[in-house]
Image: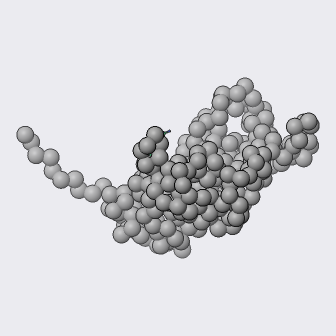
């Protein structure tokens, strides 16, 4: 379980998060949604200690994350961040094996088990046949799937993902999020696409200007009257097969008067 409370953060004096809290229940998928610049990535980075909040606390299974040594944190939290890893001259298989690093002692090389776990992770994202290719030569979507495989190979009990469906075609958007959900591990995922959030998240936190505009079970947050003032678009909702479907339309802009 991951919880955060009273999280406040500023970049160079500019406030970005103000008293934000969340609770990612054990084994469930919590989605972070909100317009551009609302603070989703900043909050996610605070959860995995890449940023330190000005105030507030983040707990991992009840322990403050800032108290956990880096290696232990890496065994317990896997991260798929937005920024690409440095362009290392390594193969796809080697990139995924890096996910095993927190599990090996510095003195020994990767074991047969490590290789087997990495191969399984690659297969799960449909990239097994690309194992020997150079990572840096992959397309954006292929890289994304490999980075997700690296996170799976880490076998951490918590998974944090920042817009993991960026660069993916529709089929892989669903496959990757379906896979993440089926893992049954505690997950926090930043998502832009609210229909993907509807299908794959158990709960949502809606950020708006650095504060929590709404939080709760997915179907309760994804209501037109909640979304419209935050995104400033018209929203229509249909409930189909137990899943919320949203259709968006730009609001009529006031006519611009000729000078
Ligand atoms: P979101 O993920 O919801 O789009 P971010 O957390 O990326 O939002 O950004 C929140 C706000 O913080 C934005 O106004 C953004 O411009 C600003 N910001 C993000 N990263 C930095 C940074 N490294 N330095 C200064 N401002 C930043």
223 to the left or right of 74? left
The residue nearer to you, when weighing 49 against 141, is 49
> Looking at the picture, does residue 159 appear above or below residue 138?
below
* Outermost residue, left side: 259
Q: How is the image coloured?
A: one colour
- Residue at 58% across, 47% down: 52
Decide: is 94 above or below 212.
above
Q: Quadrant of residue 131?
A: top right
173 up-or-down from 60: above or below:
above
Q: Is residue 141 visible to us here?
A: yes
9 sits to left or right of 93? left
Picture coordinates of residue 220, whole percent (x, y) = 47, 73
Does any portion of residue 118 appear in the rendered image? no
Res 59 quadrant in image: bottom right
Residue 51, image x, y percentages: 58, 45
> Residue at position x 60%, y 58% from top?
57
Figure quadrant of the C terminus: top left
Please, which residue is most extreme toward the top here? Answer: 89
Residue 205: percent from the left, percent from the top? 51, 63
| Quarter of image, res 122 | top right
> On the rendered image, what quadrant is the N terminus found in?
bottom right
Q: Position of residue 161 (x, y in %)?
A: 61, 51
Q: Which residue occupies 53% across, 50% down? A: 54
Marks counted in the figure total 0
């Amino acid at each position: 379980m991951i919880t955060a409370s009273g999280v406040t953060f500023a970049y160079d004096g500019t406030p970005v998060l103000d008293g934000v809290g969340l609770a990612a229940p054990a084994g469930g998928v919590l989605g972070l949604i909100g317009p551009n610049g609302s603070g989703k990535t900043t909050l996610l980075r605070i959860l995995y200690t890449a940023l330190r909040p000005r105030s507030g606390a983040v707990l991992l299974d009840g322990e403050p994350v800032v108290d956990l040594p880096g290696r232990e944190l890496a065994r317990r939290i896997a991260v798929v961040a937005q920024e690409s890893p440095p362009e290392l001259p390594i193969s796809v298989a080697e990139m995924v094996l890096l996910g095993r690093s927190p599990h090996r002692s510095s003195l020994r090389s990767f074991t047969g088990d490590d290789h087997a776990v990495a191969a399984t992770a690659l297969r799960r994202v449909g990239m097994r046949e690309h194992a020997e290719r150079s990572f840096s030569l992959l397309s954006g979507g292929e890289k994304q799937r490999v980075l997700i495989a690296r996170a799976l190979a880490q076998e951490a009990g918590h998974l944090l993902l920042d817009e993991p469906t960026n660069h993916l075609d529709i089929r892989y958007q669903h496959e990757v999020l379906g896979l993440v959900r089926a893992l049954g591990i505690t997950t926090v995922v930043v998502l832009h696409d609210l229909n993907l959030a509807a299908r794959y998240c158990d709960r949502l936190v809606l950020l708006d200007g650095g504060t929590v505009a709404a939080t709760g079970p997915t179907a309760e947050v994804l209501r037109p009257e909640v979304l419209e003032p935050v995104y400033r678009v018209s929203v229509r909702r249909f409930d189909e097969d137990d899943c919320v479907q949203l259709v968006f339309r730009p609001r009529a802009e006031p006519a611009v008067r000729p000078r």
